[in-house]
């Protein structure tokens, strides 16, 4: 069995429970979370698209972030829900590779988009007169495409570098979706170069983005505190607080999953940490932004009223 991936055509994912009633309960919970996530993020996409008040760089990036969040959750949750409902843990090698690629890609794009959003807030608050020039529609599109294309390269490299390995110890992945650390643990090949490249790229990108975000907000806060009018300070902080909360939650959840000591077998802790990372942040992002933004709440109420009127007429 020198090359496990050429012999075995599937892996086995971690199951939430071996109790049938609990499996159905987990399916229902995942379905509720996934439906709420899709509704929340798609509502933000619709509102920021059809309402001209939201045709600004800040909401352009928020719209893209909502699209990424909806896709991020769609990569893992539907498969996990179906597996739980059908009591089926199997996933093909091809599907596992696709899931790893998409999870890595979405995580990369989300983090770099959050970094770009910090740049947007910095320019808006620290250089308001130059804001229309620095953050022009063309520049915003270029920055977004840069996040996407570099994400494709990043995900392609790590996915290909992972699946060059041989897997002969086990085909059981101690995770409810495929991810690189879980596959490295069951590989019988030398994984030092994989771990080194994964940690090295993650540190370079993570530390670089985090340093940029931190520097941006240090400049933002020092500028805002010099505003003579308290109301102006409050408005400036209100546009920054949701972004800071989202960034913090994303980084903390990523740390909990990938920098904690790995366990040799699946456990409830592994499931909770995985859910914390892959489900909760995309679910909470639209809520965090909506609760702190009166314009979005007002536009949401208007859209919901129109939808109710249309449904009543139908």
Image (tube, grey):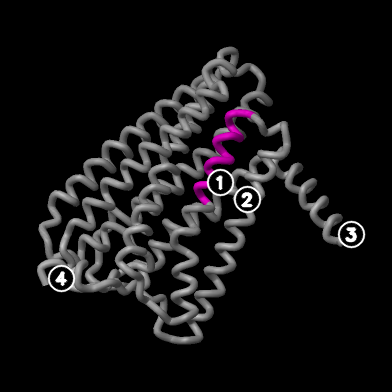
Q: Quadrant of residue 313?
A: bottom right
The residue that label 3 is drawn on is 313
Looking at the rendered structure, the secondary structure element under dot 3 is: helix
Q: Earlier in the sequence, mark 1 or mark 4?
A: 1
Q: Earlier in the sequence, mark 4 or mark 3?
A: 4
Q: Earlier in the sequence, mark 1 or mark 3?
A: 1
Q: Which mark is residue 42?
A: 2
Distance from the alpha carbon under mark 1 to that under mark 3:
30 Å
Verify CB contact (< 8 Å) between mark 1 and mark 2: yes
Judge depth for marks 2 and 3 and give the one in front: 3
Q: Quadrant of residue 258?
A: bottom left
Residues packed near mark 2 inside 10 Å, few (<14), some (14 to 19) or many (20 plus): some
Looking at the rendered structure, the secondary structure element under dot 1 is: helix
Residues packed near mark 1 inside 10 Å, few (<14), some (14 to 19) or many (20 plus): many
Q: Which mark is residue 168?
A: 4
Distance from the alpha carbon under mark 1 to that under mark 4:
39 Å
- Point out residue 2 in the picture as x, y percentages from the top left corner: 10, 68
What are the residue bounds of the magenta stretch? Answer: 56-69
Judge depth for marks 1 and 4 and give the one in front: 4
Distance from the alpha carbon under mark 4 to that under mark 2:
42 Å
Find out whether residue 63 is within the magenta segment.
Answer: yes
Q: What residue is rendered at 66% in x and 49% in y?
A: 43
Q: Earlier in the sequence, mark 1 or mark 2?
A: 2
From what the image shows, is residue 192 above or below residue 293? Answer: below
**Quarter of the figure with the C terminus:** bottom right
Looking at the rendered structure, the secondary structure element under dot 2 is: helix
From what the image shows, is residue 291 above or below residue 1? Answer: above
Observer-nearest residue: 314 or 179? 314
Q: Which mark is residue 98?
A: none
Verify CB contact (< 8 Å) between mark 1 and mark 3: no
The residue that label 1 is drawn on is 66
């Amino acid at each position: 069995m020198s090359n496990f991936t050429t012999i075995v055509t599937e892996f086995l994912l971690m199951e939430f429970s071996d109790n049938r009633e609990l499996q159905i309960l987990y399916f229902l919970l995942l379905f509720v979370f996934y439906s709420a996530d899709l509704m929340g993020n798609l509502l933000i996409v619709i509102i920021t698209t059809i309402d001209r008040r939201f045709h600004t760089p800040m909401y352009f990036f928020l719209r893209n972030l909502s699209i990424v969040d909806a896709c991020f959750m769609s990569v893992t949750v539907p498969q996990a829900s179906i597996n739980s409902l059908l009591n089926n843990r199997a996933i093909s090698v091809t599907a596992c590779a696709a899931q790893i690629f998409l999870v890595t890609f979405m995580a990369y794009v989300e983090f770099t988009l959050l970094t770009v959003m910090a740049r947007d807030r910095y320019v808006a608050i620290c250089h308001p007169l130059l804001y229309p020039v620095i953050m022009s529609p063309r520049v915003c599109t270029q920055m977004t495409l840069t996040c996407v294309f570099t994400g494709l390269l990043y995900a392609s490299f790590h996915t290909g570098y992972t699946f060059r390995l041989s897997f002969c110890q086990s085909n059981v992945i101690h995770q409810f979706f495929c991810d690189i650390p879980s596959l490295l643990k069951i590989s019988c090949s030398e994984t030092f170069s994989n771990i080194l490249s994964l940690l090295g790229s993650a540190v370079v990108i993570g530390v670089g983005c985090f340093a940029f975000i931190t520097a941006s907000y240090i400049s933002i806060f020092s500028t805002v505190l010099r505003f003579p009018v308290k109301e102006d300070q409050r408005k400036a902080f209100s546009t920054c607080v949701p972004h800071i909360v989202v960034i913090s939650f994303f980084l903390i959840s990523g740390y909990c999953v990938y920098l904690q000591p790995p366990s040799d077998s699946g456990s409830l802790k592994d499931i909770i940490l995985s859910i914390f990372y892959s489900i909760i942040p995309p679910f909470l992002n639209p809520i965090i932004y909506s609760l702190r933004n009166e314009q979005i709440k007002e536009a949401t109420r208007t859209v919901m009223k129109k939808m109710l009127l249309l449904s009543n007429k139908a």
